[in-house]
Structure formats: structure tokens, C-alpha cells
Image (cartoon, helix red, strand yellow):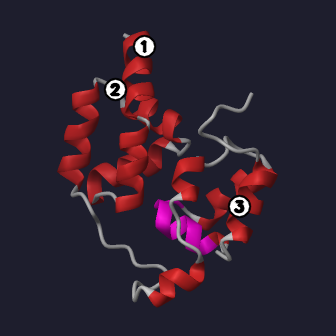
Amino acid sequence: MTTPTTLPGAAFRAARVERNLSQRDVAIALGVTAMTVCNWERGRVKTGNLMALQSLKPREKLKASGRPIGHRASFKKGHEVTAWRIATGATQGVVAQVLGISQESWCRYERTGASRLVWYAMQAARADIEARAVQAA
């Protein structure tokens, strides 16, 4: 079943191609591996976050803005990401599931920090994360 925040694999790929982004570009911007993006597009795992994909600028605009493709600077430090999760009352697994990423990827954000794109996806999904944390408790 598709929720309002996720896309089927083919639609996710179409949205990526429409923005003229490679799987690697999307992976770097979302803080996942290119293989994860490939698996989303092939329907092997839960699809990627639509809001995160929609927030990606087309490749031409990224280059024009002076921000290179593949820029990985953290927007929020790891301890800030961890504090955010604790404030929601959620486990790492719940947050990862709602965001459509692996728990390993979420742990990496808590260790190394999160990009602006990931941070905004976290904020957008906060109500859902808090609701699932209450259900799990």
C-alpha cells in the first residue's frame, strides 16, 4: 500500500529522471547508498521518501547554485540528530522505518550528522514518528 509520502519504484525513478539526477546524486543528497536508490526503484525495498525527492533541485540548478553534486556537509551534528529522536520518544528502528531508510543509515546519521535534506524529511515526518512511537510503547 502506498502512503502519501512514498512512491512506487517506477514513479520514484521517473521523478528522479525528470530532475536529471543520477542514482548517485540522489543517494548522496539523501545520505544513502546508490544501491539503496536502485533497490527503491526496482521495488525490492520500501520506496524512497517522496518529500525528500521533491526537495532535490534539478541537476542544472545545483550546478548553477555553485553547490557541487555530491556535497556532503552536515547540516545538523550527530548529537543533534540523536537528541531529536529522543525528543520524539521513538526508537532508531521506528524512525528509520517511517523515513524509509535502513536502521544502519539512521545510526550513521546519529554518528555523523544529517544533511539539510534529511533534516527536513525528519521534520516533515515527525508527527508520524511520534504516533508510531506511542503505538510501540
**From the viewer's perspective, is 35 left or right of 120?**
right
Asked if marks 3 and 1 touch (Cβ < 8 Å), the reply is: no
Q: Which residue is mark 2?
A: 90
Number of marks in the rendered image = 3
In-front residue for pair 91/118:
118
Number of other residues with Cα within 10 Å of mark 1, as a class: few under 14, some 14 to 19, many 20 or more: few
Q: Amino acid at mark 2?
A: Ala
Q: Earlier in the sequence, mark 3 or mark 1?
A: 3
Q: Indicate the position of residue 53 as horizontal and vertical percent values.
A: 57, 57
Q: Earlier in the sequence, mark 2 or mark 1?
A: 2
Q: Amino acid at mark 1?
A: Ala
Q: Indicate the position of residue 46 as horizontal and vertical percent values.
A: 67, 40
Q: Indicate the position of residue 40 as horizontal and vertical percent values.
A: 70, 52
Tell me the CA gap for discs 2 and 1.
Answer: 8 Å
Q: Tag 2's secondary structure?
A: loop
Tell me the CA gap for discs 3 and 1.
Answer: 33 Å
